[in-house]
Image (cartoon, helix red, strand yellow):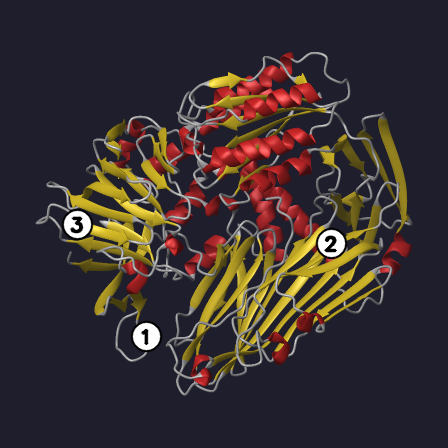
């Protein structure tokens, strides 16, 4: 939830047919694109306006896509078509659902917003516009910027995909404390584009304008291709004195910013709890080693530290914490370099061991901060596997004494599990993305928590004069961050007093400040370009965020109360939050409504209906139970509330069968469900790519019309992988290695890593090569499900029953054929196939997963 703040934009038009001339190519033309951002005391209000014209002689589809920060709340959206405005209306989620009971994808009711990256989510809407007609899209969102590592950052991702006649990014910043530094940066800036950038700054205000002409946007004068493809960044920080912070007041609401400077850092007592189970093998454990080696160098001499590693067993590096002397750090570096991965995942015992080590620690600095940093990439599979029991065990053991930070590596972790555990124990959760910079992500997180300078902070205000106070007690404060408290003044006051109590490394602190209400109100008078009620909206935004965060670790009854409060504020201030939806209405001749829901970080991973840790025996009886029985089980197991589960379950289409094969079309947000009649053949040639040096064949079962065997062949290294429902065999240089399905394991041959997740899947990965993944599905009959990751690495020479779709599949334009919305024409290798929209079970996830919406096609081998 606590991401570095950024603003991102991606607006482009998708053409219905491939045109032959430049005029036809840009028949859908973005002739105006404005980004207007006003930042007042960290609270940002952004309006994106895109004006599009259809220059074709027939109707075309115009698409509006904007990437915005995950921490932002959409507050308004509208479309104006031929002078008629179609507004978005924000409603309570269940009420909005009644207006939207079609177009369900993956069992979710969201149609317009999805997570697209570490810090971004994408707003997307399409509308058909008539020949020679215009449409104006306008999206507004708001966000409270969070200070991290000493700065605020606005990142605007610019990708219009065509030259835009009127293009403009306009950023106004007003910081009454004073602007300490301000800088701009860009990944696409050239000397010519620099001429289009102006920056004006005084003591408290800044104005940044980027307004390139069409000629300045061009890659070269001869081509109508745009340079505007990348990041536009604004970074700044504010001035601070050695006081109790800065208080600002507008229309009876106040906000208090507190970020002390030049204070001594607390010594840290930190235990790194590192997952070394089989799924961490290869790149993940290598990146973890790299990050830990760097982190060791950043330890201060007065810090104490240790390591606990775990798979199905828990191992302590040392029996107690060691001081970060040069000798001990060198010894730890040697240990880190030996880390390898295999086996299961016993998170419960690993964390309990870490708490025990801190409980027994002796000769630690009297004033110091103790913390546990957990890094894991999977579910608890060894020891205690019920996540609710683990959460209770850890909270009882920690008992408020230490801070627990949970880092989830990749997308196989249950982020909700880690988030609840962290928030219940004074820490935060963060996802580490499986990219080349994963080691830098780990180091970056450590840097954020490496310098605690205050603990047990209490921000006190007069009880009889203030109401609606946001969180005002904080366990830790880290250098480079900022504490923000907001509230409403309910009585006539000349002075608003504040008192801050905290513990520093040197002593107990008491800081006092008094704000002159009339003087503070005067600061924001006559600021014509600043939206006037920003502190009230900031207060509402912060309150909603904190209520939702608090509900994660609350008991069920308290959770409902907190969500009701957050919902009421979301509706009052028109915020699209996880509790509300925005109904987007379109012209009557098109699909008339879509919903914009707010995704969460947990939506960024594999959906699960049943809680982690529920055994197969517990699940099998649900085939004949009622929805009420299912709800009762979920409640006992610590799953989401009945109301939310029913809400999610109602719109889901039925999916009673699995497809033989599933694939995601490259560069297209479309899924194909593929079936082939291959029983008459000993094997089906599924895929070959000579440039990748990869071939995959499969065999259908005698009793089931699904694949029960796959053969994966690599050229370099020369390895054959035989995968069946009974066994996994690796063959290399006339030697064979057997890997059972009954336990997690990893084997690496000349850079080719083969990892088995117990009873669930096998993954084969090789640098710069597509990743092959096979799921083991046990319901109703045992079979195997094949799919690929990193499919952009396939060459244009890829072939085979499955492979041809990665190079030669293209949906045809439906403008000239009469077909239903659930039918389309798909061209594959020169042949046309009429495909239908269906819902199937998704073997890429789990056997009890939500259905997948896909285009179904039958092919002959």
Say which of marks 1 and 3 sits in front. 3
Q: Secondary structure at mark 1?
A: loop
The residue at the point 76 percent across, 65 percent down is 530
* For residue 467, above or below residue 197: above
Figure quadrant of residue 673: bottom left
**Residue identifier under label 2:** 42
Q: Mark 1 vs mark 3: which is more N-terminal?
A: 3
Q: x and y percent of residue 175 in the render?
A: 81, 57
Mark 3 element type: strand
Of the residues tagged 2 and 3, which is closer to the observer? Answer: 3
Q: Is residue 801 above or below residue 421?
A: below
Circle on res. 53: none
Could you tell me if residue 288 is visible in this image? yes
**Residue under the image location 46 percent in, 37 percent down:** 283
**Given contact means CB atoms under 8 Å apart, are the residues at marks 1 and 3 in contact?**
no
Disc 2 vs disc 3: Cβ atoms closer than 8 Å? no
- Residues 97 and 125: in front is 125
| Tag 2 secondary structure | loop
Find residue 813 and name its label.
Answer: 1
Task: Identify the residue position indicated by label 3 in the image.
Answer: 684
Q: CA distance from mark 2 to mark 3?
A: 59 Å
Nearest the viewer among 577 and 843 is 843
Relative side of 297 to 227, left or right: right
Q: Out of 14 and 847, give the one closest to the viewer.
A: 14
Q: Quadrant of the C terminus?
A: bottom left
């Amino acid at each position: 939830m606590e991401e570095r703040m950024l603003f991102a934009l991606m607006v482009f038009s998708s053409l219905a047919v491939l045109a032959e001339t430049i005029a036809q190519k840009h028949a859908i033309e973005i002739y105006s694109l404005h980004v207007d951002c006003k930042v007042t005391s960290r609270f940002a209000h952004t309006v994106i306006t895109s004006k599009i014209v259809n220059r074709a002689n027939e109707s075309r589809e115009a698409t509006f896509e904007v990437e915005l920060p995950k921490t932002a709340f959409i507050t308004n959206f509208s479309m104006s078509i031929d002078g008629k405005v179609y507004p978005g209306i924000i409603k309570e989620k269940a009420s909005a659902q009644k207006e939207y009971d079609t177009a369900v994808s993956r069992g979710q009711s969201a149609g317009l917003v999805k997570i697209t990256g570490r810090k971004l989510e994408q707003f997307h809407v399409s509308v058909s516009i008539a020949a020679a007609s215009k449409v104006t899209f306008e999206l507004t969102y708001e966000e409270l910027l969070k200070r991290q590592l000493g700065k605020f950052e606005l990142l605007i991702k610019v990708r219009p995909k065509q030259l835009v006649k009127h293009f403009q990014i306009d950023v106004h910043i007003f910081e009454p404390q004073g602007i300490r530094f301000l800088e701009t940066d860009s990944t696409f800036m050239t000397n010519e584009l620099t001429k289009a950038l102006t920056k004006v700054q005084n003591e408290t205000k800044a104005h940044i304008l980027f307004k390139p002409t069409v000629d300045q946007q061009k890659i070269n004068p001869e081509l109508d291709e745009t340079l505007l493809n990348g990041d536009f960044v604004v970074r700044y920080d504010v001035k601070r004195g050695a006081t109790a912070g800065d208080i600002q007041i507008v229309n009876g609401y106040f906000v208090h910013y507190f970020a002390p400077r030049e204070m001594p850092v607390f010594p840290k007592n930190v235990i790194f709890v590192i997952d070394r189970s089989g799924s961490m093998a290869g790149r993940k454990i290598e990146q973890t080693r790299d990050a830990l080696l760097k982190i060791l160098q950043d330890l201060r001499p007065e810090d104490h530290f240790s390591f606990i590693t775990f798979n199905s067993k828990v191992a302590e590096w040392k029996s107690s914490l060691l001081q970060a002397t040069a000798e001990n750090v060198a010894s730890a570096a040697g240990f880190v370099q030996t880390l390898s991965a295999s086996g299961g995942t016993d998170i419960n015992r690993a964390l309990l061991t870490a708490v025990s080590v801190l409980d027994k620690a002796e000769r630690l600095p009297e004033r110091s901060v103790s913390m546990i940093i957990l890094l894991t990439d999977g579910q608890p599979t060894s020891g205690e596997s019920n996540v609710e029991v683990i959460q209770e065990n850890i909270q009882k053991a920690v008992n408020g004494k230490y801070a627990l930070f949970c880092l989830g590596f990749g997308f196989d972790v249950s982020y909700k599990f880690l988030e609840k555990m962290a928030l219940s124990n004074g820490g935060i959760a963060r996802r580490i993305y499986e990219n080349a910079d994963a080691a830098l992500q780990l180091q970056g997180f450590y840097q954020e928590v490496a310098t605690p300078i205050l603990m047990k902070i209490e921000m006190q205000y007069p009880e009889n004069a203030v109401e609606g106070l946001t969180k005002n007690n904080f366990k830790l404060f880290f250098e480079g961050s900022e504490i923000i408290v907001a509230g409403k003044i309910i009585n006539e006051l000349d002075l608003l007093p504040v008192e801050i109590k905290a513990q520093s490394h040197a002593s107990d602190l008491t800081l006092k400040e008094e704000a002159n209400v009339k003087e503070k109100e005067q600061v924001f008078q006559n600021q014509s370009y600043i939206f006037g009620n920003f502190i009230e909206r900031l207060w509402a935004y912060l309150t909603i965020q904190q209520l939702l965060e608090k509900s994660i670790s609350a008991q069920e009854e308290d959770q409902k109360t907190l969500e009701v409060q957050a919902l009421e504020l979301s509706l009052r201030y028109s915020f699209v939050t996880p509790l509300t939806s925005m109904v987007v209405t379109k012209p009557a001749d098109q699909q008339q409504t879509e919903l914009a829901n707010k995704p969460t970080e947990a939506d960024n991973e594999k959906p699960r209906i049943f809680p982690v840790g529920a055994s197969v025996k517990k699940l099998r009886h649900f085939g004949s139970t009622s929805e009420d029985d299912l709800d009762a089980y979920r409640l006992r197991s610590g799953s989401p509330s009945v109301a939310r589960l029913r809400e999610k379950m109602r719109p889901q289409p039925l999916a009673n069968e699995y497809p033989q094969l599933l694939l995601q079309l490259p560069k297209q947000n479309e899924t194909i469900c593929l079936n082939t009649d291959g029983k008459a053949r000993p094997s089906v040639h599924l895929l070959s790519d000579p440039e990748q040096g990869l071939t995959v064949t499969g065999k259908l079962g005698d009793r089931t019309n699904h694949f029960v065997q796959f053969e994966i062949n690599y050229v370099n290294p020369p390895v054959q992988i035989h995968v069946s429902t009974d066994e996994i065999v690796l063959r290399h240089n006339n030697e064979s290695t057997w890997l059972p399905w009954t336990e997690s394991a990893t084997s690496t041959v000349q850079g080719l890593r083969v990892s088995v997740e117990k009873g669930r899947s096998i993954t084969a990965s090789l640098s710069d090569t597509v990743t092959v993944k096979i799921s083991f599905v046990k319901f109703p009959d045992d079979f195997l499900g094949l799919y690929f990751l990193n499919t952009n690495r396939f060459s244009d020479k890829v072939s085979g029953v499955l492979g041809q779709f990665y190079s030669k599949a293209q949906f045809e334009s439906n403008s000239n054929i009469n077909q239903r919305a659930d039918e389309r024409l798909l061209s594959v290798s020169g042949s046309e196939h009429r495909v239908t929209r269906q819902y199937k079970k998704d073997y890429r996830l789990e056997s009890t997963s939500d259905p997948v919406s896909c285009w179904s096609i039958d092919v002959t081998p």
